[in-house]
Image (cartoon, rainbow, N blue to C red):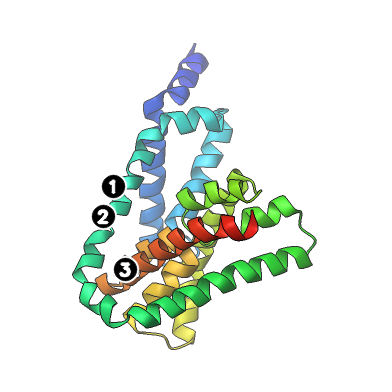
């Protein structure tokens, strides 16, 4: 009886929401406690959730259906990025052309290097196409990957890994390179680590977060419009 009761609790919709929030709160506490960049809250929380789902025998479809209300918050969170953009609109106008050149170069190099490395290593076409949009946020990368012949689920995993690795290594690499300008750091986070990098950029400062949000948004729009035309 106890086992049946636990199984019912494990499959309850509210359990998925509670598990998601608890895992992230713990991961955030661990990250702040240790200060280790490799212990990114997203990576740690995902690892915890996967481990608990496997332990309880709950499939992903059940968890996803229960945790769907959490995903609804993605839209308002994305719209909220307009606040730092509005606060720094004068600064963005001043740096308009440097920003456009940086985003164009970063976007082209990201796709070109991904395709070149994938082909050089003999990856299948579907795998390469799944990797191509990995530098933009997940809601854009998944449908774009499907349009150009990739696999949406694989693209989602690559996007997450790109964001986590970019956020973990970005501050260290920028420090080594002597990059301390908030706008430059923000563009780097937005181009190389999309939403996860933007969240980290906001922790560094509003101007850094504004340019990260700008880079993530414009690069996402450009990718959604141009990548299917070039690779489909």
Which quarter of the figure has residue 35?
bottom left
Asked if the residue at tag 3 contacts the one at tag 1, i.e. Cβ–Cβ closer than 8 Å, the answer is no
Above or below 135: residue 181: below
What kind of element bears circle 3?
Answer: helix
Asked if the residue at tag 1 contacts the one at tag 2, i.e. Cβ–Cβ closer than 8 Å, the answer is yes
Find the residue positioned furthest to the front: 229
Left or right of residue 214: residue 128: right
Q: Is residue 97 visible?
A: yes
Mark 2–mark 1 distance (CA, rounded to whole Å): 6 Å
Asked if the residue at tag 3 contacts the one at tag 2, i.e. Cβ–Cβ closer than 8 Å, the answer is no
Above or below 75: residue 103: below
Mark 1–mark 3 distance (CA, rounded to whole Å): 17 Å
N-terminal label among 1 and 3? 1
Q: Which residue is mark 1?
A: 76
Q: Which residue is mark 2?
A: 80
Above or below 43: residue 114: below
Which residue is found at the position 76% from the left and 57% from the top?
A: 123
Classify 10 Å Cα crowding around label 3: few (below 14), some (14-19), many (20 and above): many
User: Where does the image place residue 92, in percent across and percent down from the top left?
Assistant: 28, 76
Residue 209: image tag:
3
* Front-lying residue, 28 or 65: 65
Q: Is residue 33 visible?
A: no
Which quarter of the figure has residue 188?
bottom left
User: Where does the image place residue 58, in percent across and percent down from the top left?
Assistant: 54, 28
Which residue is found at the position 78% from the left and 68% from the top?
A: 120
N-terminal label among 2 and 3? 2
Classify 10 Å Cα crowding around label 2: few (below 14), some (14-19), many (20 and above): few
Mark 2–mark 3 distance (CA, rounded to whole Å): 12 Å
Classify 10 Å Cα crowding around label 1: few (below 14), some (14-19), many (20 and above): few
* Front-lying residue, 83 or 32: 83
* Front-lying residue, 191 or 13: 191
User: Where does the image place residue 54, in percent across and percent down from the top left?
Assistant: 58, 34
């Amino acid at each position: 009886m106890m086992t049946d009761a636990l199984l019912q609790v494990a499959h309850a919709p509210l359990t998925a929401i509670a598990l998601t929030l608890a895992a992230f709160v713990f991961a955030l506490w661990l990250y702040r406690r240790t200060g280790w960049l490799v212990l990114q809250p997203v990576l740690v929380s995902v690892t915890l959730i996967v481990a608990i789902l496997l332990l309880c025998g709950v499939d992903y479809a059940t968890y996803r259906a229960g945790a769907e209300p959490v995903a609804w918050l993605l839209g308002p969170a994305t719209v909220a990025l307009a606040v730092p953009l509005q606060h720094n609109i004068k600064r963005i106008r001043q740096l308009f052309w440097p920003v456009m050149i940086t985003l164009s170069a970063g976007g082209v190099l990201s796709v070109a290097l991904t395709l070149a490395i994938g082909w050089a290593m003999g990856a299948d076409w579907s795998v390469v196409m799944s990797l191509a949009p990995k530098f933009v946020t997940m809601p854009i990368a998944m449908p774009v990957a499907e349009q150009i012949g990739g696999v949406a689920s694989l693209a989602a995993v690559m996007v997450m890994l790109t964001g986590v690795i970019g956020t973990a290594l970005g501050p260290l690499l920028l420090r080594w390179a002597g990059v301390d300008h908030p706008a430059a750091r923000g563009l780097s986070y937005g181009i190389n680590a999309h939403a996860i990098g933007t969240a980290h950029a906001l922790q560094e400062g509003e101007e850094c977060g504004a340019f990260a949000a700008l880079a993530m948004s414009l690069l996402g729009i450009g990718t959604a419009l141009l990548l299917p035309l070039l690779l489909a």
